[in-house]
Image (spheres, rainbow, N blue to C red):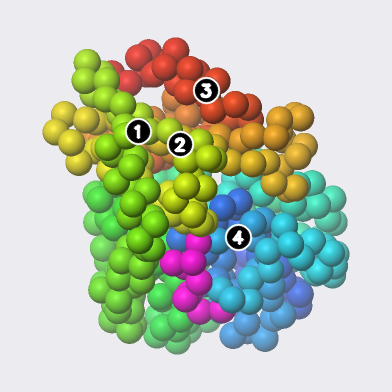
Amino acid sequence: MATLTPIFSAAELRTAQEFINQSNNVVILTHMSPDGDAMGSSLAMRHFLEAQGKHVSVIVPNAFPDFLAWLPKADEDIIYESRRAEADALLEQADLVICTDFNEPKRIGSLGDKLLSLTCRKMMIDHHLHPSDFPDLTLSYPASPSTCELVYRLITRLSPITDTRSSITEEIATCIYTGMMTDTGNFSFNSNYPEMYQIVGELVSLGVNKDEIYNRVFNAYSADRMRLMGYCLYQKMRIFPEHHTALIYLSRKELYRFNFQSGDAEGIVNLPLQIKDIHYSCFMREDKVNPTEVALAGGSKTKIKISLRSQGNRPVNVFAKDIFGGGGHANASGGEYYGPLPEAVQRFLDNYQDYFVL
């Protein structure tokens, strides 16, 4: 087992173990538009807890991408948007709710209101800045590149058996590796972190086929998705060379033209960073407000999803927080804007020069 620097205190670990020992019905929640880290961390915790005899359900606010559907037990996730009554019933029966990969209730839409109304114990496992104070136990470590890494660290510390092979099954290892890989862009950002590679080595020794996982995630796109990428680069990419910045934005009409499916926009924000001297990239796409976001939308029927990426010592998380009420990591952040796409674009253009500097 990898020897890692402890990041959770003894008191936090005791409390986490107590919460688990005293629970029978556990619900795990993760954020809207679940990505690899959200899916991997929630499913890894599910496998770990089920091995201890717990009844565990994973609820996601809305649909996850097809390229993550192969993850062990992903097909059993309950999508709140389409199975709300069933999900509410499970939450009301829960004696422990575990929140993975999100730091505040608004990141799960109207499911957040349901979460806050519950009287059962709540535990958060997350790596984003500024965690909210709603949980009874917060296991937060923003320096970590992924929540999946935190789940690995937690599981190996909670296991009564110190042999990693007894606590981390191949299914758990696969889920954890997938989240670590995707939240670092296949280890291309937020990844200059030696202990992360100790964990990766351990996961591979436990049976993870990293090459197969890469192919399932990054080489499983549709022809429509490839055409969409070409359209973004040829027709929609704007370059601002004096600020080493690129911007791509897509309307719903443009997305429908390419038969857009959940996950098809994954990675588009990274493409401009392959251009010499482009250090900042922003990608916006228009979406409709789904039923779980009505309260957040303030009457708007349109939501703009905003992704931001950067290279080196050039943070984008402050811009995401100040301009779009979002956040994230220094080189990988995001936010939302409830309103028309042209307004969101103009908001970007009015402010980026004050933040994107060398």
Q: Residue at x 56, y 73 (%)?
A: 74
C-beta proximity under 8 Å, tags 1 and 2: yes
Write down the quadrant of residue 247 in the picture. Answer: top left
Crowd tier of the residue under label 3, counting other residues whose Cα lies within 10 Å: few below 14, some 14–19, many 20 or above: few
Instruction: Decide which of 35, 322 is in the foreground and name it.
Output: 35
Crowd tier of the residue under label 2, counting other residues whose Cα lies within 10 Å: few below 14, some 14–19, many 20 or above: many
Q: Secondary structure at mark 2?
A: strand
Residue to which mark 3 is pinned: 342
Tell me the distance, in whole angstroms, between the alpha carbons under discs 3 and 1.
14 Å
Mark nearer the N terminus (4 vs 2): 4
| Rendered position, 288 above or below 196 | above
Tell me the distance, in whole angstroms, between the alpha carbons under discs 3 and 2.
10 Å
Taking 104 as reference, is 175 left or right? Answer: left
Q: Position of residue 157 (x, y in %)?
A: 48, 70
Q: Secondary structure at mark 1?
A: helix
Amino acid type, mark 2: Leu
Please say whether residue 56 is one of the residues in the magenta stretch: no
Q: Which mark is residue 197?
A: none
Residue to which mark 4 is pinned: 63
Residue to which mark 1 is pinned: 236
Q: Which mark is residue 250?
A: 2
Instruction: Decide which of 245, 29 is in the foreground and name it.
Output: 245
Q: Residue at x 44, y 67 (%)?
A: 67
Crowd tier of the residue under label 1, counting other residues whose Cα lies within 10 Å: few below 14, some 14–19, many 20 or above: some
